[in-house]
Image (cartoon, rainbow, N blue to C red):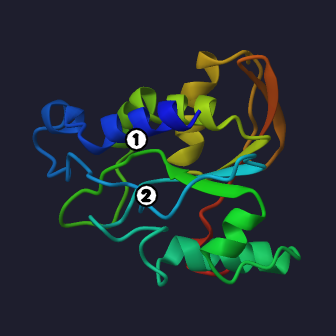
Amino acid sequence: MNGERKNLQAEIARCTLCVTQFPRLRVNCPPGTIYPNNVQPPQHVRILFVGVAPPKRGRHFYADAGDNLRLGLFSVLTALGLQCRDLQDFLGHGFFLVHTAKCAIAGTTEPHLPVSLYCSSHHLRREIEQLQPDAVCWLSKIVAYKVCLALRNEWENKKEIPFGEVTEVGINGKNVLFLPTTWPGRGWQR
């Protein structure tokens, strides 16, 4: 899996598809390095969290200790009894995080649904298949949940995936739990 993952990450790092697909947006494409070299997924990914997109080039969950998504998610996990003070704790629990879109959009921290849908159809689906998580937690009703619904037909799932409920989805012969929930970066989530 390591070789395949490195190849996919290298492909993502140099991807420029969004520049031609969305010429009116200032998508920071190619995104360059998504995950710092010292951040590798756990051997066994228990829960894969799917965020929306990095808010700015070079500032994201793995690179910025003050990232709102990181602070909010760690707070929720700690409240659930899973101590998450830093990335080492997060990864040690078997958790990993990826984004629907790999590129930020210049001049805004807001996500863009069409970019997330387009980018995830090229990259996120393959990341999930490579990481083979036990569960995927989709972190956003407005963007990530819609990406979840768009991707579900790529796998062995023909049933509904209700927001806020756990649903089992077959991915390459493995049953994976999906939970679409709210984005925890505002600090008020339970």
Residue at coordinates 29% horizontally, 45% vertically from top-left?
Answer: 13
Amino acid at the residue labelled 1? Gln
Q: Residues within 10 Å of mark 1 (few under 14, many from 20)?
A: some
Residue at coordinates 72% horizontally, 47% vertically from top-left?
Answer: 45
Image quarter (top left, top right, bottom left or bottom right) of the C terminus: bottom right
User: Is any part of residue 31 visible from this angle?
Assistant: yes
The residue pinned by badge 2 equals: 35
Task: Residue 4: give x, y in percent of width and height.
Answer: 49, 30
Task: Residue 113: give x, y in percent of width and height.
Answer: 39, 44
Task: Residue 59: give x, y in percent of width and height.
Answer: 35, 71
Q: Looking at the picture, does residue 150 appear above or below residue 73?
A: above
User: Is any part of residue 140 visible from this angle?
Assistant: no
Amino acid at the residue labelled 2? Tyr
Report helix, strand or loop for mark 1.
helix
Contact? badges 1 and 2 (CB < 8 Å): yes
To which quarter of the image does residue 160 belong? Answer: top right
* Sequence-earlier tag: 1 or 2: 1
Q: Residues within 10 Å of mark 2 (few under 14, many from 20)?
A: some
Who is closer to the viewer here, 88 or 136? 88
Task: Residue 149: give x, y in percent of width and height.
Answer: 60, 31
The residue pinned by badge 1 equals: 9
Cα separation, mark 1 vs mark 2, equals 9 Å
